[in-house]
Amino acid sequence: MTDKQLKVLCIGDSITGWADLSKYMKFSNVLELMIGVRVGFDAVTMTNKGIGGDTTQGVRERFHADVLQQQPDIVIMLIGGNDVARSFPQQQTRDNLNFMYSELKNANIRTLAMLYHVLPNPKNPATAWDTLDDNNQLIAETAKQYGIEILDMGSLMKDATKIYKYEELVNLNDGVHLNPGGELVFAKAIFNKLVELGWI
């Protein structure tokens, strides 16, 4: 057992949360294994603080307890998609993101802000949750202001359709919620980004 634990925390909405190991592993579970192979399984601790349906306001309200008090070394954040569905004004979303990014920067926590994906079902594209990624530009703009690193899962998930079947990646109806293949794509993309940044 090593004395130094690398603490990684994932926070967001249902794409991050809703873990049910009786069905399959979430990307945070797979990511923990991948990091463990690299740094040692005893040297990494993964915490998943995703809550289905959450918004930037919800994460902001639980930010101190669910993020800062956990004292993570790395935070992986995917939040803001549900703000559109709840008709939040963009300024409110911006203010919430500014608050969280500022707190993370002040705490010297390495942070990876992720952008959303939407993959409409080619056979029934009208059912896709096509507003989920509407705040991607806002997420990216605010992250850049604080020197927060960005990972665009929209482009990476589109690339993944060349390798995986659609139904392996996402829910057939909404084109958003991850199936096992999508969880793998997320885990590999995050892992590769963390290695590229020299964080692990």
Image (cartoon, rainbow, N blue to C red):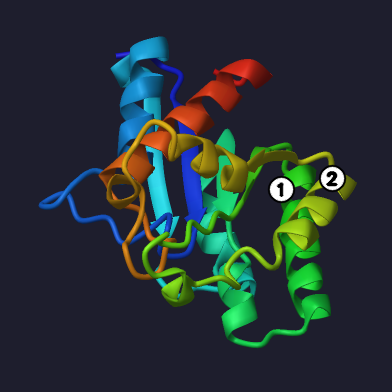
Q: Earlier in the sequence, mark 2 or mark 1?
A: 1
Indicate the position of residue 129 as horizontal and vertical percent values: 49, 72
Identity of the residue furthest to the left in this view:
22
Quarter of the image for the N terminus: give it. top left
Is 149 drawn above or below residue 192 in the view shown?
A: below
Quadrant position of residue 19: bottom left
User: What residue type is disc 2 on?
Assistant: Lys
Indicate the position of residue 58 as horizontal and vertical percent values: 56, 75
User: What residue type is disc 1 on?
Assistant: Leu
Indicate the position of residue 123 as horizontal and vertical percent values: 37, 64
The structure residue drawn at horizontal position 31% and vertical position 25%, both measured from the top left corner, is 33
Q: Nearer the viewer, residue 15 or 37?
A: 15
The residue that mark 2 highlights is 144
Is 79 drawn above or below residue 146 in the view shown?
A: below
Label 1: which secondary element: helix
Is 86 drawn above or below residue 15 in the view shown?
A: below
Q: Nearer the viewer, residue 73 or 142?
A: 142
The structure residue drawn at horizontal position 84% and vertical position 45%, both measured from the top left corner, is 144
In the figure, is residue 182 to the left or right of 192?
left
Find out whether the residues at labels 2 and 1 contact each other: C-beta distance under 8 Å.
no
The residue that mark 1 highlights is 104
